[in-house]
Image: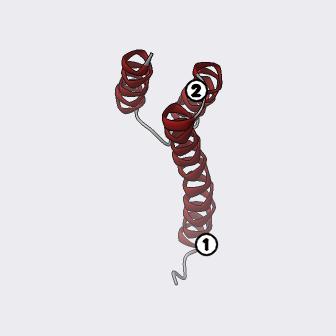
């Protein structure tokens, strides 16, 4: 543990951000997983709504700084491509 006050603060901030980022990443992964399950088993309408939720989760992760915008765009493109292929 650091002794300098500013360094202590930076450690605390890093811990808070790590927890926040992990939470956001987990939410994105969950949304994508729910979409994949819906795509395999359920109707096209349900798959479409879960796809929209997954795309929103990816966009939110970009605005929070958790994902790079190009990484999110790539993931969104792949999810959409799978949806179009299935239909």
**Closer to the camera in the image, 67 or 26:** 26
Picture layout, residue 45 above or below residue 30: above
Q: Left or right? Give the position of 60 relative to 75.
A: right
Q: Which residue is mark 2?
A: 47
Q: Residue 57 at x, y = what percent?
A: 59, 34
Regarding mark 1 in the picture, which secondary structure is present there?
Answer: helix
Regarding mark 2 in the picture, which secondary structure is present there?
Answer: helix
Marks 1 and 2 in Cβ contact (< 8 Å): no
Callout in the foreground (1, 2): 2
Residue 41's mark?
Answer: none
Identify the image quadrant of residue 81.
top left
How crowded pointer 2 is (Cα within 10 Å; few <14, some 14-19, many 20+) is rated as many
Q: Left or right? Give the position of 62 relative to 73.
A: right
Q: Residue 10 at x, y = what percent?
A: 55, 64
Residue at point 58%, 26% (across, down): 47
Residue at point 55%, 76% (across, down): 4
Residue at point 61%, 72% (across, down): 5
Q: Which residue is mark 1?
A: 5
Chain-order first, disc 1 or disc 2: 1
Q: Residue 70 at x, y = what percent?
A: 35, 26
């Amino acid at each position: 543990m650091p002794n300098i006050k500013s360094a202590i603060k930076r450690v605390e901030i890093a811990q808070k951000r790590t927890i926040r980022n992990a939470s956001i990443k987990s939410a994105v992964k969950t949304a994508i997983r729910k979409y994949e399950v819906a795509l395999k088993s359920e109707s096209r309408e349900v798959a479409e709504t879960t796809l929209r939720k997954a795309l929103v989760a990816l966009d939110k992760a970009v605005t929070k700084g958790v994902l790079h915008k190009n990484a999110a765009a790539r993931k969104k493109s792949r999810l959409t491509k799978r949806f179009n292929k299935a239909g």
